[in-house]
Image (cartoon, grey):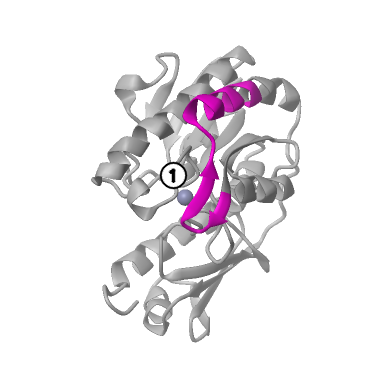
Amino acid sequence: MRVMLSADMEGATGVTAPADVEPGTEEWRRFRRMLTGDVNAAVDGLYAGGATEVVVNEAHATQRNVLIEELDPRASMITGRHKPLAMMQGVQDADAVVFLGYHTGAGERGVLAHTYVWSGLQQLRINGAPASEGRMNALLAAELGVPVVLVTGDDLTCAEAESYAPDAERVTVKFCVSRYAARCLAPSRTAALIREAAERALPAAAGRVPPRPDGPFRFDVDLSATHLAEFVTVIPGVELTAPRTVTYTLPTMIEAVRCFRAVTTIVGAAKETVFD
Ligand SMILES: [Zn+2]
């Protein structure tokens, strides 16, 4: 079994503050080691559970967070940005995927909840239902016939994962108190929990193929300011459907996710520092 492990950072052990996940800060330097610990625990468990290859795909910010010098040598790592499938690069070559360090979506409760951009985007809906990165990525994986076998993050991320990946193992590494506070388990404890769940994950998923989601996929994106929504309509097919909402519909998830990346890249570029 070949496994792609998508490693985000907001849902990693101990992480609760924006500075913890902002590349270059003192806190980020500390917490990238914590993220690497979560990754290695999962890699160890996946191999114990029958994985033949584990590819870690960095999914956070600059996508250069995991410390390769500390990476389990059995794994390889896709590091660096501007990848065609971003958080899900490598899913095309995998038999199973892991969402590690994931978080809830913009507008939801949860530690460091957001969707792709930290501010400016208030909610994403896919075919009318609120969607986090986890839900979006699980739909993409399902379109390719690849099951999600393990999700780690805060308790609310794990609760949400039950709805989009009901058969996946889930590991709560912290319990949300507010968007910027959590009751966190110690790294030694979360490593043991992640390792045990990862070892169970592949045998539990054997022979399981997720149902292919039916397209087309309508994405509604609520933004925080009118100029952001108006500017995003430079993308062909993206229409303004309310003063702060843009909408587009595409036949497959691969196309819809790629368009969402274009939308969020433009939002990131068009935000002002004092106003949105
Ligand atoms: Zn994320």
Q: Considering the image in quadrants, where does the C terminus appear? A: bottom left
CB at disc 1 and ligand 1 closer than 8 Å: no
Quadrant in the picture for residue 228: bottom left
Local packing at callout 1 (Cα closer than 10 Å; few below 14, some 14-19, many 20+) is many
> Residue 262: image x %, image y %?
40, 61
User: As rendered, which of 31 and 254 lies closer to the eye?
Assistant: 31
User: As rendered, which of 30 and 56 lies closer to the eye?
Assistant: 30
Lateral position of residue 33 relative to residue 138, left or right: left
Q: Secondary structure at mark 1?
A: loop
- Say above or below: 207 vs 162: above
Lateral position of residue 71 relative to residue 115, left or right: left
- Say above or below: 57 vs 43: below
> Residue 206: image x %, image y %?
74, 23
Residue marked by disc 1? 15
Q: Does 247 appear in magenta?
A: no
Identified at 42% across, 65% down, the residue is: 263
> Residue 58: image x %, image y %?
40, 37
- Say above or below: 64 vs 197: below
Residue range in magenta is 176-197
Identified at 67% across, 37% down, the residue is: 145
Residue that extends furthest to the bottom in the rendered view of this protein: 243
